């Protein structure tokens, strides 16, 4: 059975690894798109939106509702890709950890 000191050291190591993983997630960018690429959203793997690009042909009064739908779809696509990228990176982090059965790390 590990000592309290060993458990505390293991906890500190996990905290350091989690901090590094969070930093890495801020550096990974994903692109969500809709309308055949007419609307694009770039976000980090943690879900922070970095940019939004809209094709100028969509900027008409007649296309307002369609543009709104395309923006929502592009954001959702970026969010989905960010979640996947985040899961992949966190999987790399936890691959070498000896975690107790049923133990789950917090989501980012």
Image (spheres, rainbow, N blue to C red):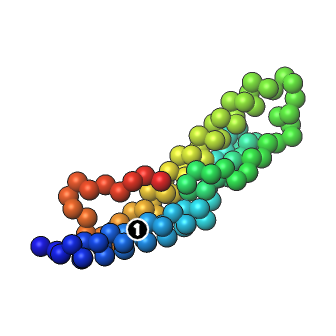
The correct choice, above or below, for 15 with respect to 84 in the image is below
Which secondary structure, mark 1? helix
Residue 49 in percent (x, y) is at 66, 50
> Between residues 46 and 11, which one lies in front from this camera angle?
11
Q: Given the current orientation, which residue lies at the most extreme left position?
A: 1
Answer few, some or many: residues within 10 Å of disc 1's Cα (few below 14, many 20 plus, some between 14 and 19): few
Residue indicated by mark 1:
15
Residue 71 horizontal side relative to residue 82, left or right: right
Judge by depth and name the residue closer to the eye, 10 or 24. 10
Q: Residue at x 55, y 66 (%)?
A: 23
In which quadrant will I find the N terminus?
Answer: bottom left
Please state the horizontal and vertical placement of residue 92, each as a whole percent of the image. Answer: 41, 68
| Residue 75 figure quarter | top right
Residue most extreme to the front: 4
All told, the count of numbered labels is 1
Q: Is residue 93 visible?
A: no
Q: Say above or below: 20 vs 103.
A: below
Q: In this image, 100 relative to 28: left or right?
A: left
In the image, is 17 to the left or to the right of 26?
left
Which residue is more in the foreground, 25 or 10?
A: 10
Residue at position x 59%, y 40% in the image: 76
């Amino acid at each position: 059975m590990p000592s309290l000191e060993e458990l505390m050291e293991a906890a500190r190591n996990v905290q350091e690894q989690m901090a590094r993983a969070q930093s890495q997630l801020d550096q990974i960018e994903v692109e969500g798109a809709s309308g055949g690429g007419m609307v694009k959203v770039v976000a980090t793997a943690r879900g922070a939106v970095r940019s939004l690009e809209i094709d100028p042909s969509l900027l008409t009064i007649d296309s307002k509702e369609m543009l709104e739908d395309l923006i929502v779809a592009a954001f959702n696509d970026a969010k989905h890709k960010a979640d996947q990228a985040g899961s992949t990176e966190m999987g790399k982090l936890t691959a070498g950890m000896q975690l107790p059965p049923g133990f789950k790390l917090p989501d980012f």
